[in-house]
Image (cartoon, rainbow, N blue to C red):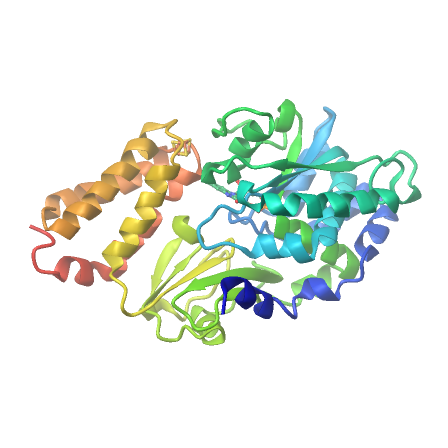
Amino acid sequence: MTVQTVIETRVKGLTFATIPAGEGLAKALAMPRGDIIDLISDSKLKGRGGAGFPTGLKWNLAAAEKRTPKYLICNADEGEPGTFKDRVILTDYADLVIEGMTIGARAIGAALGLIYLRAEYAYLKPHLEEVIEARRGQGLLGKNIGGVDGFDFDVVVGLGAGAYVCGEETALIESLEGFRGEPRNRPPFPVVSGFLHRPSVINNVETLAWVACILAKGAEWFKSSGTATSTGRKLFSISGDCARPGVYEFPFGITIAELLEEVGGENAKAVQVGGASGRCVPRSAFSRRIAFEDVPTGGSIIVIGPGRDMLEVAHNLLEFFVDESCGQCTPCRLGNAKLLEGVEMLMEGTCTSEYLHDLRALCNTMQVASKCGLGQTSSVAFCSILDSFGDEILGHAGRVR
Ligand SMILES: Cc1cc2nc3c(=O)[nH]c(=O)nc-3n(C[C@H](O)[C@H](O)[C@H](O)COP(=O)(O)O)c2cc1C
Ligand code: SF4
């Protein structure tokens, strides 16, 4: 069975399929702008792009800005290793995403929406443009949307630059403006000074689709699943050593063990939760819950089977970061290369325990001193592998001098 077939068979039954088209936007257009944001805040929706920032709070900050024009950007870069749920959403539920963008634009007062589409998803651009054109024809984009005088909003699609760091919101903005995709200093945050140095909201594809659902079905409906802190349901991209990989929807709060049972990964030795920048959770911790307050994730779950060498896993992840560091700041540019070199020394048996200690200190430095989320999180997997698989790694004869 090809990966594509697997994905198609696992996405059936998503909540998105049950939401009547246009209901969320129709309700939003009948509400004062502030009430739309209050509803999203009340739902406790947190961003599905990884960091889990409260969507209502982000919108409130942008709405409070006086400078115009404002922009609403849909982050469809989906570069985190092991993530492919946004591709499925854009393929099957593009209308819902653009409806969510339109609701967001109404709430914050944005004039233009931009979809930053991962370069490898270029084949989806014509599809998205067709959906956008059809919505213009239905009066759901363009001037006086839905017959509301003065509500003008349109959406365009821009292609990504093929770099992981361009998913980081400020690098994304640089890239959208036609510059090299390198993160900016924050503050100012994009809600104050984003695209073209104007107030901008950046939201993940899935976040925007849930916005349309919440407007249609209400905050209580959304909060009826998930945990008190991590409300609602979430899409997961599940890959690796399991019998049934694919895109799944589960409520926040599901334990890792329960999730593995669903996907046929019960034998796993570990799970990499949150992609390359996430943490490696060992079998002994499979009772932990997937939630922002326990084990957070933007949706990438990579199952690691019993036969895997954990040093090989760490090597693979660090090679990715050495390639993808934009090189702007030293802790990330040199730190990832040093960690990779350390893993290679461990493999060759030339790493001393003192040097391993220094590498751990380097991880801390990278986490506090790197400029953006890439360098701040790239050592997390290495540290968690050392913490949980120290015996396997250090027990190999000759690995530590
Ligand atoms: C290196 C890096 C890559 C990122 N890649 C993505 C991405 O591909 N998609 C995404 O939605 N967020 C990504 N993010 C998070 C974004 O910066 C931002 O927090 C997110 O788009 C906000 O949307 P949300 O609040 O709806 O989650 C990335 C962050 C970092 C540091
Ligand atoms: S942390 Fe890494 S990716 Fe981010 S700005 Fe610094 S060098 Fe670039």
Q: Quadrant of residue 18?
A: bottom right
Horizontal side of 204 relative to 143 (left or right) equals left
Horizontal side of 195 relative to 377 (left or right) equals right
Q: Quadrant of residue 224?
A: bottom right
| Residue name at image x 50 percent, y 54 percent | 83
Tell which of 205 and 129 is nearer to you.
Answer: 129
Q: Quadrant of residue 271?
A: bottom left
Q: Position of residue 253 (x, y in %)?
A: 52, 66
Would you place residue 289 above or below residue 164 in this image?
below
Q: Position of residue 152 (x, y in %)?
A: 84, 35
| Residue name at image x 64 percent, y 69 percent | 12
Would you place residue 236 above or below residue 183 in this image?
below
Q: Position of residue 335 (x, y in %)?
A: 28, 36
Would you place residue 69 above or below residue 94 in this image?
above
| Numbered disc total | 0
* Residue 38 visible at all: no
Horizontal side of 309 relative to 93 (left or right) equals left
| Residue name at image x 82 percent, y 41 percent | 141
* Residue 144 visible at all: yes
Horizontal side of 361 relative to 173 (left or right) equals left
Would you place residue 77 above or below residue 187 in this image?
below
